[in-house]
Amino acid sequence: MRRELRACEVLIAFCFFIEIEAYLYQREGLVRLVGGPTQYEGRLEVYKSGRWGTVCDDILNNSLSVVVCRSLGLPWKTSEAYGNAKYGEGSGPILLDNVNCSGSETSITECIHIGWGSHDCGHSEDVSINCLPYETLRLVGGSNRYEGRLEILTQRGWGEWGTICDNHLNDKLAVVACRSLGLPSNTPEAYGGALYGQGSGPVVWQGIKCNGSESRITSCMLIGLESINGSKQCTHDHDVSINCLPTRVTAVRLYGGENELEGRLEVYKQGRWGTVCDADLNDNLAVVVCRSLGLSWNTSKAYGGAIFGEGSGPIWMDTVNCSGSEANLTECRHRGWGVSDCDHGKDVSINCLPPNEGLVRLVGGPTQYEGRLEVYKFGRWGTVCDDILNNSLSVVVCRSLGLPWKTSEAYGNAAYGEGSGPIWLNNVICSGSETSIKECKHMGWGLRYCRHSKDVSINCLPSNEILVRLVGEPTQYEGRLEVYKFGRWGTVCDDDLNNNLSVVVCRSLGLPWKTSEAYGNAVYGEGSGPIWLDNVNCFGSETSITECKHNGWGSHDCDHSKDVSINCLPPDENAVQLIGGVTDNEGRLQVYKFGRWRSVCFNELDDKLSAVVCRSLDLPWNTSMVFANEPFIDGAYKLRILCNGSERSVDKCKKQRYICQSEVFIFCLPPEEYDFRLVGEASDYEGRLLVYKLERWGTVCFDDRIIPFYDTVCQSLGLLWNSSKAVDRKRFYTEEILNCDVSERRFKECTWEHYSKCSSGKDVFISCLQSKDDLVASVHKPSNSPRQQLSINTWLISTLGAMVLLFLYKN
C-alpha cells in the first residue's frame, strides 16, 4: 500500500513539474512596458529564463514598437520606439541587442537579433515604447487663435513646451500644424525668425520637412541636432511661427530713394514692413517688383549692400529666385518667410528707371578742370577709390566731360578733399580708349574695401610748374625734400630711394649735384603735409622730378617717418672729432654724417679704430686706446665703424648701422704719460696700486699675469723690491689691466689690455716691505710723490742706516 502511495506522489510531482515547465515555456518572450505614466508606454522589458531584462536601442526603429504593442493588445499604428532610456534605466540583464523587426511579426521572439544575452550596451541605451503617443501643439503670441509661435509639448519633459527651428521651413509645415489643431489649413503660412516672439523652453527640433499630407507633425521628417552636419544648434531667434488664416495681402514698396522709382525694397507681411536679403541677387527680382508696382521695368536693376540705407524691421525674404515672368514677388522662390541669416547691411534696393549710369563730375577744385571725381549711381553721387590708379582713368573722365585730356592726371589720397557719400567704385582699370567710366573694369558698384581718405581726384589741365624745395636745415644745400602740388607742399616717401633722385632735384634747383646724396627715414625731420610721391625712380638725366616714374600723385603706403631728405653739397665724410675730454687728445668720437655730427657705437674690437682716428687728427696714435663711454648720448643716428688699423681716415673703414649701448671714447696719448703710487694703507711701502694716466688715477684689475712682476712696480717707485709681494683686494673701479714682460724693469714699458669687466672683481694690492729686516727701512720713508725717484746716494745712506739699526737690534 505504501509503495502504491509513494508511486502516486511521484507521479503527481512529475505532472506538476511538467505543468510548471510548460507554463514557464509559454512565458518565454513575454514583454511588458515599465516606468511610464500610462499602460500604453514605458521601458520595454522581455522575459527570458525566469528573469525580466531590457532591450538595447542599437539599429532601433518603429517596427519594433508595432510588434510589441500589437503583441500586448494595445494600439500600434502610430506607436513609437525610443532609445536612450527615455522612461528610465532598467537594472536586470540586457537580453536583446540589434533587434530588427519587419513589423509583421506576432512576437518579439520572431524578430532578428544577435542572440539572447549578447550585447555591447549599458542600461543608458534601454529601449522604450509608446503605443499611443500624443502630441500637443499650440500657437502662442499672436493676436488671435489662428496665429502665433508654434510650440509643442515635449514628451521627455512632461508638460514642458518647446519650439521648432526654422531650418528647411516651408508652408507645408503650416498645413500639417493647422490641420492637427483643427484650424483652417487651405492657405496657411509658416514664418521663421521668431516673428511672434522668442520662446523660452527647449528647441525641440532643429528643423522639420513635411510634404503636407501628414496627419500630425511627428509624421514629418524631424531633424535633430545630430542631423545638421555639425552646424551650430538653433537658438530661439529662429523659432517657427504659423498663421492658419493669413491675410492674402502681400504688398511691396520702394523706400528711401529720391523718387518713387527707386529705394530699398520692403515687403508687407503680417502687419509689418520688412526687407529682403541680397543673397543670390539678380535683376530678375527688379523686373518682377517694378512690373508689379506698375513702373518701368525693362532697364530696372536690383542692388545689394543697402545702398539706400538699412531697414529696421524683420528680414522677410532671403535667397529670392525669380525667373522674371512672375506677376508678383510672392511667386518667386525663397527660403521661407522670415527665414534668413542676413543682417540689414545686405538689404536689397531697386531702381526701376536708373538714370544715365556713369555720369561723372569734378568737385572741390579751384577750376572746372580739376577736383574730386564723383560718379552718379542709384540716384546718388559717390566717389572712386584710388587702388591701382593711373592716368588712363583721367583720360576717360576728362574726355567724357568734353575737357582737355591729353595731359590729364589722376591723383589719390583725396588730393581735393574727402567726399561724404557712398564709395561707388574701386580697382578701376581703364585702357584710355573708353568713352565712359562705366566701360572700365572695376570690382562692382558699391562693392568696396576703401575709405574716403583714398578718394580719386582728376586734373584735366594740370600746370606744368612743379616746385621743389629743401627745408629743415640751416643751409640752402640740404633739407627735407618737399614738392608743391594742388596748392600744398608735400613730402616724398623713401621707398626704392637712390641718389639719382638727389641729382635731379639738386640740378633742378641750380645747386651742386655731382656728389649729392638722398637720405630716407626723415633724417632732416618729418613733414606734416600730404605725401605726394612714392617709389620715385629717376635715371638722373631728368630735368624735373615730374619726369621720374612714381606711383601717382598722392598714391603711397608711407608715413612721414619715411620722408626723403637731400644734401646737394655734402661735407667731407672723413671729418672726425673728439669731444668732452679733459685735453684735446681725448674725447667721445664723432663722425660728420648727413649734415650732422654723429656719435659712434662702441665695439670691443675698436682698438684699431683709435689708431686710425688719432693718426687722421695728427695726434699720437702708437699707444692710443679706445674705451666705452656710457650712456649713448646721440640716438638720432647709430653708426658702427670697423677698421683694420692701416687706414689713413675713417672713410676707408667699414660703416654700418648699429644698436648702441655705449659710445666710443678715444685717448690719443703720448707714450711717456704713465705714473704710479700705492694708497690706502698707513705705510708708504704698500697699498692698492693706482695708475696715473691722462690726468686721472685708476686702479688695476688683479690678474695672475701681474703676480710675477710686482717687483717692477716697487723698483719703479724706488722702494725695496727683492721681498715685495702682490695680492688681490676686493674693490674695483676701472676697466683696464696691465700686461708686463719678465724682462721689463720699468713699469711704464708695460702694455695695456682693455677689459669690459674685471674678471676677478678685485684690485691689485702690492707690498714692497714684508720681512722683519725691512722694518729698519721705515726710518727713511720715501715720499709718496707720483713722479719722485730716489737718488742712488740717498738709497745707499738709507741702506747703511738700516744695517746699523739691524746690528744694534740683534745685539
Image: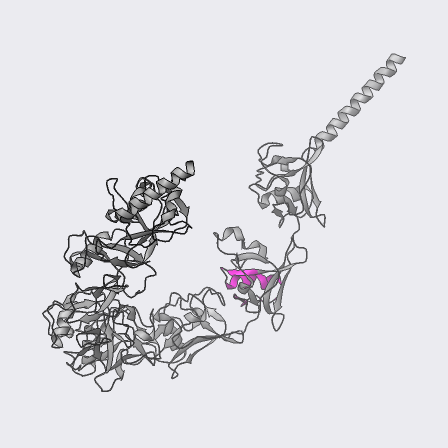
Looking at this view, name the residue that lies furthest to the right.
Answer: 1
Residue 323 percent location from the top left of the image: 37, 67
Residue 350 percent location from the top left of the image: 38, 76
In the image, is residue 461 above or below residue 190?
Answer: below
- In the picture, measured across the screen, residue 706 lies left or right of residue 440, that is right
Q: How many marks?
A: 0
Depth order, front residue of 802/511: 802
Q: Quadrant of residue 526?
A: bottom left
Q: Quadrant location of the N terminus?
A: top right
Residue 265 percent location from the top left of the image: 42, 75
Q: Residue at x 13, y 77 (%)?
A: 509
Q: Quadrant of residue 546?
A: bottom left
- Mark yes or no: residue 463 visible: yes
- In the picture, measured across the screen, residue 419 lies left or right of residue 212, that is left
Depth order, front residue of 208/360: 360
Query: Is residue 1 covered in magenta?
Result: no
User: Bounds of the magenta span?
Assistant: 164-193
Looking at this view, name the residue that lies furthest to the bottom.
Answer: 367
Query: Is residue 169 covered in magenta?
Result: yes
- Mark yes or no: residue 755 visible: no
